[in-house]
Amino acid sequence: MIELKSFSKVGLAIFMGIGLLAASCSKEIKPKEPEMNPVKKEVNGLEGTWKMTYAEIRENDSVQVKDLSSADFIKIINRSHFAFFNQERGTQENFTAGAGTYTFDGSKYIENLEFINFVDYRGHSFSFDVEINGDSLIQQGYEKIEASGIDRYILEKYIRIK
């Protein structure tokens, strides 16, 4: 005859063994780790990295075409912010940078310039008409800051960098 004490110990051992076996056979569910470099679908055709290929400034009665033969001008636009960098190649001279938020309704692009190394431009908004055709972007409009006497029309052309 089996004692009740030993039956309880045997039963407990069998029960624990079955429990461990069941636990080891079950699929472990781990939380999904976020991707390190998620690829996000762009919200509008404006998002991306753009390289300036042409720029002209019309001020008073003159037209100035920007010489891009020895400089790179890059504009980066994400879902809510833009940034631009202008650097003469092979030197530390003539560096310009700016950034801020923007709005875009499909053709009207408004930059709210929050950061720039030219103090007169900081804190101002500039409205541009934008046309996107494939990997080309044309941006044109007025930069006007009455307090600083800045009043000029700009035309900029960019290609998308892939």
Image (tube, rainbow, N blue to C red):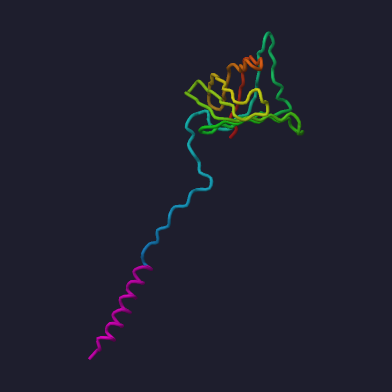
Name which quarter of the figure residue 69 lies in: top right
105 to the left or right of 60:
left
Name the residue at 48% across, 49% down: 34
Q: How many marks?
A: 0
Q: Residue furthest top?
A: 61
Position of residue 6 measured from the top left corner of the image (x, y, whole percent): 29, 86
- Provide residue 92's location: percent of width, then percent of height: 76, 34
Residue under the image location 40 percent in, 61 percent down:
28
The residue lying toward the viewer, choosing from 126 and 44, is: 126
67 lies left or right of 77: right
Task: Name the residue nearer the viewer: 156 or 93.
Answer: 93
Residue 1 x/y as whole percent: 22, 91
Residue for point 68% across, 8% down: 61
- Against 12, residue 81 (above or below) is above
- Give the farthest residue toward the left: 1
Q: Nearer the viewer, residue 148 or 102?
A: 148
Outermost residue to the front? 147
In the image, the segment drawn in magenta is: 1-24
Q: Quadrant of the C terminus?
A: top right
Q: Examine the rendered structure and indicate whether residue 25 appears above or below residue 106.
A: below
